[in-house]
Image: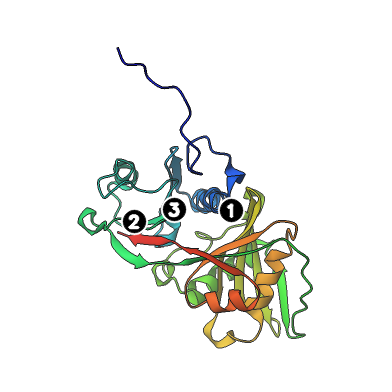
Amino acid sequence: MCEVSTERPLEDGWLHDTPVDDALLRRFVFSQADVNAIMAHAAGGWVDHTDEVFLADSGTPVPYMNQAILARPLTGAGDPVLDVVDDFFAGLTHTTTLLSIWPTPDLSQQGWNLVGHPAMVARAPGPVGYEPAPEVEVRVASTEDDFVVAERVIIDGYPMPQANDLPPGRLFSPALLPAGITVRLGLLEGEPVGVGNAHVGHGVVNLCLGATLPAARRRGVWEALVWSRVAQSPDLPSVAYTSDYSRPGFLRMGFLPITRFTLWAR
C-alpha cells in the first residue's frame, strides 16, 4: 500500500496557509479582496471566498464592483476554481469581472472577454513632504452629503455610466468609513472635482479607487489625493492597480511598476 505524504509542499507563496505578509503581491490580493467585500456589503450585495478565490457582487451594474480575485494561478482553462466563480455569479444579468495577478490561459471559450492588463504600482514606506497648490484641498468624506457628492464625482469622472440611474448612496455611503474604506474628496477652488479611496489592511495602504472630473485634470487634484492617501499610513508600503492612463502619474511620483495583472469581464 502506498503511503500518502503529509509533508507540506514547498512554499511557492500561494499555498492556502502561506502567511499573508509573505510578499507584497499576496498582501495586495488580500487587501483588494477586503475592498471588494466592503464595497459589496455597503451596496447591499454579497460575498464569499475559498482558499483559491475571493468573490464579491455588489448587485449593481458596475463591473469592477462585481469581481472574483484569484488567490492562486490558474492551472488551465478548465481549472475547477472557474466553476466556483461560475456558480457564484450564476443567473446574474449584470457584468462581472475576474482579476488574476498572473497571466491566464485564454478564457474566451468560457464566455470571458479580455479587458486588458492593468499594472500594479507600489511605493516603499516613507515620509510624505508634499504640499498641494493653494487652490487644491483634500477633505475626508464624513457626512451623508459628502458621500453623495463623492459618488457623483466618481460616476462622472471614472466614468461609470452604468451607475447613472442608481439611487444616490447605492455605491458610496457613510457605512464605508467604519468598515475600513476612507473616501476623500479633492476640491479645486472650493468645488469637489476628484475622489480618492483608500483601505489600510494586511500591511499595505491600498489606493483602491480614484477619479477626477475631466475639466479639472492636470491641476494637481489627482496628485494631492494620491499623497493624502499615502500619508494615511506612511509607515506602510502603498499599492494600487492602475490603467495606463494613470500609470505615468504614479511613476512620476516615485511609485515603481511591479507587474501587470490580467482582467477579464463577462
Label 3 or label 1, whichever comes before in sequence order: 1
What is the C-alpha distance between the residues marked 1 and 2? Answer: 20 Å
Left or right: 103 with respect to 246?
left
Label 3: element kind: loop
**Mark toward the start of the polypeptide (2 vs 3):** 3
Image quarter of the C terminus: bottom left
246 and 162: which is toward the camera: 246
Decide: is 174 above or below 20. below
Q: Is residue 24 above or below residue 47?
A: below
Residue at the disc numbered 2 = 104
How much space separates mark 3 and mark 1, taking CA atoms?
A: 27 Å
* Residue sitting at x 57%, y 51%: 31
As drawn, the residue found furthest toward the left would be 109
The location of residue 118, given as percent across then percent down, is: 45, 67
Mark 2 vs 3: CB contact within 8 A: no
Which residue does the image show at 62% across and 49% down from the upper left?
179
Q: Is residue 99 above or below residue 218?
A: above
Residue picked out by circle 3: 58
Residue 140 seen anywhere in this rendered image of the structure: no
The span from disc 2 to disc 3 (Cα, nearest Å) is 25 Å
What secondary structure is marked by label 2?
Answer: loop
The residue located at (50%, 39%) in the rendering is: 11
Which amino acid does the dot numbered 3 rest on? Answer: Ser
Query: Front-most of 41 and 201?
Result: 201
Whichever of labels 1 and 2 marks the residue nearer the N terminus, that label is 1
Classify residue 54 by image quadrant.
top left
Q: Amino acid at mark 2?
A: Thr
